[in-house]
Amino acid sequence: MRVVTRPDFDGVVCTVLLMDALDIDQPVLWVQPSDMQHGRVDVKKGDIIANLPFHERCSLWFDHHYSNQPEAPIKGVFKIAPSAAGIIFETYHDKFDRDYAELVHQTDRIDSADLTLDEILHPQNHPFVLLSMTITGHDPEESRYWNHLVTLLRTRSPDQVMGDPQVKQRCRQVVADNADYEQALKKHTILTGPVSVTDFRELDPAPDGNRFLVYSLFPDCTVNVKIVYCENDQASIKVGHSILNRRCKVNVGKMLSAFEGGGHPGAGACRFARYKAADYLERIIKILVKNEPQ
């Protein structure tokens, strides 16, 4: 039995909860949603998938993404919720050795982008928000850190987690990266009606940082589209409703399911062959500018 999940804050907390509740000691399989969608993940009988699309070989599945709604009964729990971790916490509430209520509450807020302006502008003053930003989810070599964080969250208090040398170093790096990311956003983002479009295709590597910052920099936008080039001749588009100007009516997860991706009503992503980038980007922007409910 092992946990199969994605490397983001929700995925890390899902792993913490599942390992504790079900006494799992097998290494975590960290994968990207697009790899699951395209059948590139070797899922085995006994695997527990969390915060990812369903796979027929898994023994349990927990998810909350609008675009992943099952068409038939499944073993596990699916429902629209702020986080997958919250679903697992509710399912196994009487099986935990520790009190994870605050950790799950913060995961709900972060994964559903229910943040204040101060948390967006000054994540260094908000430990859980800052900690979530240390998990970028891009490089498989980072799995050592993701596993380390799972161990810390299972055994240490929040203050002890933030005081861990690896965590402290990464938090310092996040603060520095966010400053650089702000300049990159200003240079490479344009407004098309109510849509802010961040185009990092000419940058290698593409800059990364505070995913909420663009909404404060471009307060007139109701939704952001970010496109980057990835390894293996692929491209990625991420779309998110502004959490400061909530007037976008498009169901992002439903929209992106037509572009090899998916997600939630308010945020999602798709990954695809690079030659499709210009076409997909143009079509997505047109849908968002039109701003009609899906």
Image (tube, rainbow, N blue to C red):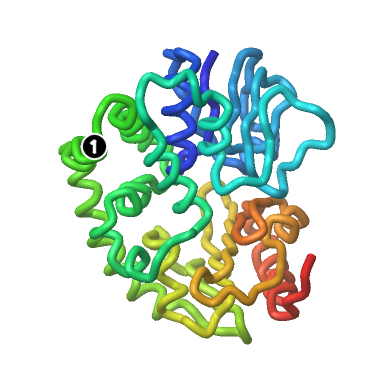
Measuring from the top left, give residue 243's x and y in whole percent.
51, 69
Residue at coordinates 35% horizontally, 24% vertically from top-left? 98
Measuring from the top left, give residue 52's x and y in whole percent.
61, 37
Say left or right for 103 vs 249. Answer: left
Q: Quadrant of the N terminus?
A: top right
Please tell me in which quadrant of the rendered image residue 78 appears. Answer: top right
Does 183 appear above or below 58? below
- In the image, 276 versus 223, the foreground residue is 223
Residue at coordinates 54% horizontally, 77% vertically from top-left? 245
Residue at coordinates 71% horizontally, 22% vertically from top-left? 75
Name the residue furthest front.
Answer: 94
Say left or right for 29 vs 42. Answer: left
Name the residue furthest right.
Answer: 72
Residue at numbered disc 1: 161
Measuring from the top left, give residue 21's x and y in whole percent.
47, 19
Please tell me in which quadrant of the rendered image residue 46 appears. Answer: top right
Say left or right for 74 vs 6. Answer: right
Q: Residue flagged by tag 1: what amino acid is it?
A: Val
Residue at coordinates 57% horizontally, 64% vertically from top-left? 240
Say left or right for 228 vs 127. Answer: right
Q: Quadrant of the C terminus?
A: bottom right
